[in-house]
Image (cartoon, grey):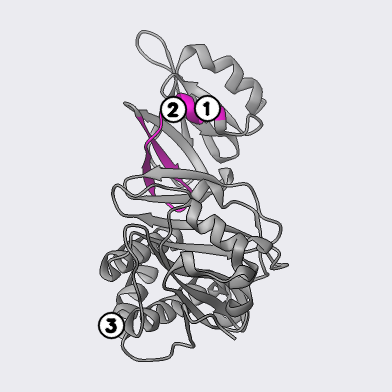
Amino acid sequence: MISPSVAAGQGGGADGSGWALRAAAHLLALPIDRAISTILAELGELAGADRAWMFEYDESLLRFRNTHRWDRIGVSQHAEDVQDAPVTMIAWLHQFLVQGQAVMINDVAGLPRTARSLKAEMLRRNHKSVLNVPLFHRDVLRGCIGFDATTRIRRWEGQAIDTLFHCARLIGLARYSDRSTGDTARVQAAPGPLAPLIYLRMQGRSRGIVPEEILGLRAAGDYTDVWLIDGSRLTDHRTLSIWAGMLPKATFVRIHRAAIVNLPHVEVLDRHAGRLRERWELRLRTLNTLWVVSRPYRAELRARLGV
């Protein structure tokens, strides 16, 4: 039996179809992770939420992590806290998600004793109201998308729930179907153990990425431009020196005081002599721009590449 402070639904109404079309357009036009982030930002604004987010389970449904997030300007960010977290943290909520139910927590402070671990975590993040909609694909629970209210108690019902259900179905289809074989009914293998994520800190949103997704990074004043394998370039609100301390030393190498690259993605190293001195440049996989290798960093790069 669900607590009176919570409303559950199965979705399926038609009210969210207009926003589902917008979501489908994003999923067709953009790389999948950028599309999901865009959808969450638009839905969060539409619903008057303070946060919109998505988390995903591992294949065992025993751990989860926040992978995409939009935060209204001025709202504190906690995405880094939810990385490889045990499902026991959200056990009370999880019991409804696995049944395909949306859960509207109108007043987090009123959650029952059986949800005390979830209540404590939500209050720590200043949650007042939360809407949770499960994300399934081919009857497999993959994750959850939803809204948070942090400034006042809110109640999302009807159209908001239907819209999230429509968008969750589309995201599940786009993210987990093997479209490369033309078989959209064929589900990709369930995700394995959760790889550690690095969370990009951007204006109003966070996005979790595995280091392998990063092609290279360049300093942009007090910020850092990050190029990803999906072709996107994002600006993180931290300096390159901070990034240098977070990245795995085994695969990342500095090539300039203002640039770091991911070695497995180095496609070409061009060492050519100019009119006055030798110039080194490299090309990263999927990028057309050349990255300059400055003299102090050439020896290490050459040794790491084995050339």
Of callouts 3 and 1, the N-terminal one: 3
In the rendering, which numbered label is found on residue 244? 1
x 35%, y 75%: residue: 155
Looking at numbered disc 3 in the image, what kind of residue is underneath it?
Gly
Give above or below for 11 relative to 273: below
Residues at marks 2 and 1 touching, judged by CB atoms closer than 8 Å: yes
Per the image, the residue denoted by label 3 is: 18
Labels 2 and 3: the sequence-earlier one: 3
Residue 117 figure quarter: bottom right
Say whether residue 92 is visible: yes
Does dot 1 land on a helix, a strand or a loop? helix
Residue 200 location (% of width, % of height): 45, 44
Give 212 or 7, whichever is nearer the viewer: 7
Residue that extends furthest to the top in the rendered view of this protein: 276
Callout 1, which amino acid?
A: Ala
Q: CA distance from mark 2 to mark 3?
A: 41 Å
User: Which residue is painted at 43% across and 42% down in the image?
Assistant: 227
Q: Is residue 19 left or right of residue 183?
A: left
Rendered-image quadrant of the N terminus:
bottom right
- Specify start and end residues of the magenta stretch as a single range: 223-245
| SS at mark 2 in the image | helix
